[in-house]
């Protein structure tokens, strides 16, 4: 679970990040210790990275999710129905 302070730190603009970087979408391919692995839309293989998520989201394999760029990575905002 991510703390409020960690969430605020992650959502602060990164001066090195391009302002044009948009939100991404993907599918959960695996979950380990509560952290999902994502296959981003348009890609054929899953990322090897596990992503942080909002506490209110309980990840499950095959969930379609929205991800927000932040601090050089992505934060999973939740499942997209």
Image (cartoon, rainbow, N blue to C red):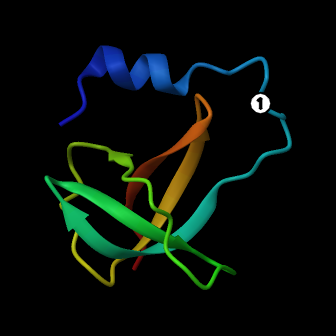
Tell me the residue at 69%/21% (across/down). Answer: 14
Residue 46 position, x and y percent, is 49, 74
Residue 50 in the figure: left or right of residue 18: left
Tell me the residue at 69%/81% (across/down). Answer: 42
Residue 10 in the figure: left or right of residue 56: right
Quarter-of-image position of residue 37: bottom left
Choose between 25 and 36: the one closer to the eye: 36
Q: Of helix, strand and loop, which one carries label 1?
A: loop
Please, is residue 53 above or below residue 47 in the view? above
Residue 7 position, x and y percent, is 38, 25
Quarter-of-image position of residue 36: bottom left
Residue 76 position, x and y percent, is 42, 52
Please, is residue 73 above or below residue 78 in the view? above
Tell me the residue at 67%/21% (across/down). Answer: 13
Q: Quadrant of the C terminus?
A: bottom left
Tell me the residue at 25%/31% (across/down). Answer: 2
**Label 1 sits on residue:** 17
Choose between 62 and 47: the one closer to the eye: 47
């Amino acid at each position: 679970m991510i703390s409020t302070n960690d969430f605020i730190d992650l959502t602060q603009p990164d001066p090195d990040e391009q302002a044009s970087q948009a939100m991404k979408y993907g599918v959960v391919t695996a979950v380990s210790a509560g952290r999902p692995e994502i296959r981003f839309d348009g890609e054929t293989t899953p990322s090897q990275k596990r992503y942080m998520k909002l506490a209110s989201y309980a990840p499950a394999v095959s969930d379609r999710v929205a991800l927000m760029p932040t601090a050089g990575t992505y934060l999973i905002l939740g499942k997209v129905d």
